[in-house]
Image (cartoon, grey):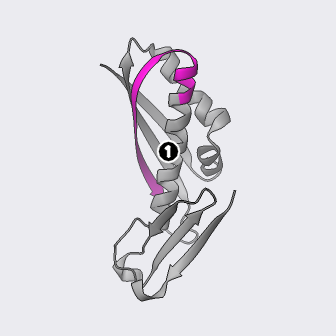
Amino acid sequence: MECTINWMPDSGMGFVAETGSGHFLTMDGAPDGGGRDLAPRPMETVLAGTGGCTAYDVVLILKRGRHDVRGCRVKLEAERAGQDPKVFTRIHMQFTVSGRALPAAAVERAIALSHERYCSASIMLGKTAEITTGFEIVEV
């Protein structure tokens, strides 16, 4: 896996990442750090990537279990250390999984498998942050 980050000097503190798969992601800093607030902060993209990683796992695990999953939303709330390096110290992930006749045990198991075995991002962040999860199931 690879990624190339390019600073856009005319933007202040804006950066464009080109991923190994050929996609682009923009990031920017806060105005008090020289940015123009035109894109997510780099650490927000880390958090978003973690949410995407675990949501992907949960949906895939449920589909492989032949469950009728129709939607998956993850809201992440995080706290960071007060001093540099400002690592994540706490992350809560609240899942809303929708589908038909989804057993709570299957959703709980999918979330646990993601966080214990498959989601590289959350396992990595778990080295510095306490990660907690919760979920609700919505029948559709």
Q: Position of residue 59 (x, y in %)?
A: 50, 29
Residue 11 falls in image quadrant? bottom left
Q: Main secondary structure of the magenta part?
A: strand
Part of the protein shown in magenta? 60-79
Q: Residue furthest left?
A: 140
Which residue is drawn at the image coordinates 59% and 33% (left, top)?
A: 114
Does residue 98 appear anywhere in the picture?
yes
Q: Secondary structure at mark 1?
A: helix
Does residue 109 appear anywhere in the picture?
no
> Which of the image's four quarters has the C terminus?
top left
Which residue is drawn at the image coordinates 38% and 75% (left, top)?
A: 30
Q: Position of residue 71 (x, y in %)?
A: 38, 29
79 or 41: nearer the eye? 41
Q: Classify 10 Å Cα crowding around label 1: few (below 14), some (14-19), many (20 and above).
A: some
Amino acid bearing label 1 = Gly
1 or 40: nearer the eye? 1
Q: Is residue 67 above or below residue 20?
A: above
Residue receiving disc 1 = 52
Q: Is residue 55 magenta?
A: no
Which residue is drawn at the image coordinates 50% and 63% (left, top)?
A: 24
Q: Position of residue 10 (x, y in %)?
A: 42, 88
Q: Is residue 120 above or below residue 137?
A: below
Q: Position of residue 95 (x, y in %)?
A: 41, 33
